[in-house]
Image (cartoon, grey):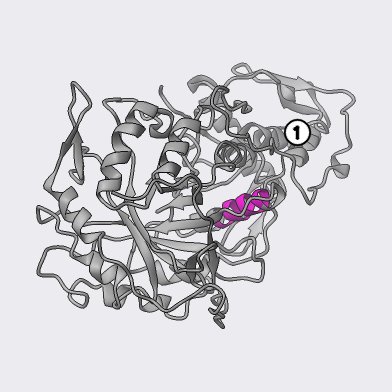
Amino acid sequence: MGTVKCELDKIVIKGNKFFNSRTGDQFFFKGVDYQPRNGELKEEYDPLADINACRRDIEELRLMGVNSIRVYRTDSSKNHDECMKEFEKAGIYVLLDLPNPHYSINRVNPYFDTEMAQNFINKINAFANFNNVIAFLVGNEVTNDSTNTPASAFVKIAAKTVKSHLKRINRNIHVGYADNDDETIREYMINYFNCGDDPEARIDFYGVNTYRWCGKDTTFKSSGFEQMVLPFKDYSIPVILTEFGCNKFRPRDFHEVKSILGSDLNEILSGGFVYEYTQEDNDYGLVELDPNTQEIIKHIDSKYLAEAYKFEPKTNYKLDKYNPKLSPAQCPEPDEIWKVKNVKQTIPDDSFCKCAMDSLKCRIAPGVKLSNTVNESLGKNIDFLCSKIGCEEISHDTKKGIYGPYSFCSPLERASIVLNKNYLKNKESKEACRNNEFSLKIIESPKYSFEKCSPISTPTFDSKPEEPTSSTQTNIKKISKNQKWNKKLFIIKIKKI
């Protein structure tokens, strides 16, 4: 059993390694992906807001030798003080995914707008003051094959948005991305997320979800791990396995841990996270929860992992003496597979979008709520108008590196900008600002001139992180949770709750 700690040491990045800032020792993740459903069928369940579940699981995680967990889904509106403090006392760091099922970059029709940015920032604010939050992930397998590479452009915009916000609130929390280890696109992505002359747009570490190593007779070479890490030779940022642990052969003995933490890979990898803590439909559980009592039923896999995590990496690197000469990667050029040109991006600017809305003469009326009827009608109207008058102001072409100035505004704001453009082209005819299925509003004297609205250098979001308390809920601005883009540029898919 590990020593109980009061406050965890800060983990910093230097070159392509993680280090303990106090001891100067190199840090390796001995992690587990932690998303117990706790008998809940709802996707909204937040394991870090359930203190009874946290206390139940912490002791088991410590027995496995775990020093870190990755949590995929959390709710920024809930209080996490008790769980986070208990994990810290147990010596466990927390890696958090920022996206959730309602706000994540759609790989087929990607965008990253002010509403998604606000949701990411809400989560940062809810967790930024906990000492054991080690990092945030801005995306998980967003681009997962050669058909959806444009989505990576928006992941990079998300990374810049998040890093800019962390800098503004003076929080040194690392920002990364997790890929799916796809052979066709992986080298493009490895280079893209670590390229360019804008340090805020480059991620701080790279994560790989990989299940190459399968079975007790597998070796470093036969598993494909040797080939997998070749693109990371001389990589300038750390690399971790954000998911690993093939389940084709049971029980899982986690023989790969010795390779990951040992001399085979510890020059390149900084450890990783075993998938996953509880038994779910996909059959990767280290433990199982009794459906009636929610008590832990141990799987033999958990004992094998505990034995594997006893292995201690041996490296000679110390923070004060490690001075690597590493450079960011070269950006991949757009081609038939990689349809992203690296350009210096602006980040979503809520004030800019609000100013634009206050300059329109025809817009969707305030208070209009999205419904299936409104959504379908709005989508048809906007698609028709775009075919007639063009929508370059709110469109993008990632292969050319072109992004309309309003392409990062919210869905209804983008639609309003197109409706206003059509209204002006029709010489402000009232018929051009009318719809039978959703309300439009004519503004005779807009508050601002459209030409005076321009992006500002520091976008205004609800940006103050909450101080951890034991009794208060995080005060977070609420925004709609049911907006998703459809295949059409402006159709918003209504998620059925």
Q: Position of residue 75 (x, y in %)?
A: 48, 31
| 440 to 140, vertically: above or below | above
Tell me the residue at 10%/56% (across/down). Answer: 249
Which of the 4 quarters of the picture holds residue 436?
Answer: top right
Q: Position of residue 276 (x, y in %)?
A: 27, 46
Q: Nearer the viewer, residue 173 or 352?
A: 173
- Tag 1: Cα neighbours inside 10 Å, few (<14), some, or many (≥20)? many
| 202 to 168, vertically: above or below | below
Q: Position of residue 300 (x, y in %)?
A: 12, 48
In the image, taking residue 87 as reference, residue 211 lies left or right, namely left
Q: Nearer the viewer, residue 446 or 43?
A: 43
| 32 to 370, vertically: above or below | below
Q: Which residue is mark 1?
A: 420
In the image, taking residue 279 as reference, residue 458 lies left or right, namely right
Element type where label 1 sits in the image: helix
| Amino acid marked by disc 1 | Asn
In the image, taking residue 336 as reference, residue 403 lies left or right, namely right
Work out which residue is located at the far bottom of the displayed protein and give it: 325
Q: Is residue 12 magenta?
A: no
The magenta span reads 156-166
| 63 to 377, vertically: above or below | below
Q: Nearer the viewer, residue 378 or 105?
A: 105
Q: Position of residue 384 (x, y in %)?
A: 60, 36
Tell me the residue at 32%/51% (across/down). Answer: 66
The quadrant of the image that shows the C terminus is top left
